[in-house]
Image (cartoon, grey):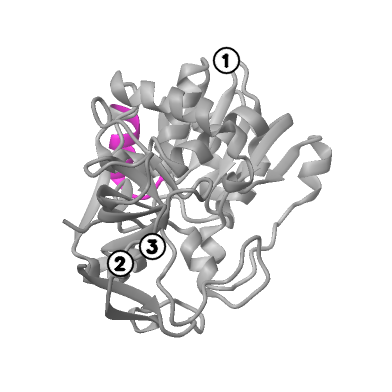
Amino acid sequence: MPRNQQILLDNRPQGEATAGNFRLAATDTPPLQDGQVLVRHHYLSLDPYMRGRMNDSKSYAASQPLGEVMIGGTVGEVAESRHPRFAVGDKVVGMGGWQEWSVVDGNAPGMLRKVDTTHVPLSHYLGAVGMPGVTAWYGLVKIIEPRAGETMVVSAASGAVGSAFGALAKARGCRVVGIAGGPDKCRYVTEELGFDACIDHREHGDLKAMSRALKDACPDGIDGYFENVGGTILDAVLLRANAFARVAVCGMIAGYDGQPLPLQNPALILINRMKVQGFIVSEHMEVWPDALKELGGLVATGKLRPRESVALGLASAPEAFLGLLKGKNFGKQLVKLV
């Protein structure tokens, strides 16, 4: 059985996360028991939610245990199987964690899923046609419930969730405005993803400037907003929201290091009779088949052209993850393991 490199959570962050919170280890992969599958991971997904799991605090999911492999989505290939539903060579997606190999119980619901790479590259099953894409789909379709002609706004627009949100909203006849960091990301959002406009938050760093930029980009106001960031951007969106606007709250990356993110004018939620709803996509597994079918079709037909940032080798994962938290990635952040 192969030697397995792993990255463990060694200690919890005190404020900002650092590379010293992680530890590289190696262990022997155990022999397979009946019903188990050995997977060689090709790509590891790095996602903002992992930062929250590193804290020892009450949240929607249990904290990442110390001394154990960091949680994370993976895609790869079945290397050995003692389960009738999985064959050697099958391409699969699962939650293998920050390691090169995993032994998976083939009978455990939702732990391992075969995927077709004929028209969709394997890595996209960790992004546009995976958890981030379904996250965008749920927030748009089930919470915002868009109508043709409405204006939709999404923060972190060039990322895995934001890019999928844009394609899904355009498919429903909406005007779509993104918020991203830097001119290169904004050009990608408008020229490759097909958004109607994109605001560079680095050029509009305070509330007044962001509010003015949103007014210019959204002359008819904002009907739906998909929140990935929090802070000043959310305050500015609330100032420009229409009556009965809907906000799907997916992430608050501006506050992942523990600092509070107060709202400047929460009365706007009442004044505009807004719906503001947080959600966790893993609690809505019933929508995944429909969402993945639509997302796969958008990628296969070129209507969704996701960008990827790829770090090489497991040892690069901590620095790539820290860069993700600071917006250094361009599109979906992955680690290539083979």
Q: Is residue 216 above or below residue 16?
A: above
Q: Quadrant of residue 85?
A: top left
Which residue position is annotated with label 2?
A: 31
Mark number for residue 214? none
Q: Closer to us: mark 3 or mark 1?
A: 3
Q: Amino acid at mark 3?
A: Gly
Q: Secondary structure at mark 3?
A: loop
Kind of residue indicated by mark 2: Pro
Q: Is residue 107 magenta?
A: no
Name the foreground residue: 317 vs 140: 317
Residue at mark 3: 97
Q: Amino acid at mark 1?
A: Gly
Residue at position x 37%, y 21% from top?
Answer: 297
State whether residue 301 is above or below residue 334: above
- Number of numbered discs visible in the structure rendering: 3
Quadrant for the N terminus in the image: bottom left
Q: Return the x and y of residue 276 as percentages of the image width and height.
A: 72, 42
Magenta segment includes 183? yes
Query: Residue 205, image x and y in percent?
Result: 47, 55
Q: Residue at x 37, y 22 (%)?
A: 298
Q: Is 23 or 311 nearer to us in this picture? A: 23
Looking at the image, which is closer to me, 59 or 328?
Answer: 59
Instruction: Give x and y (percent) for residue 287.
Output: 58, 32
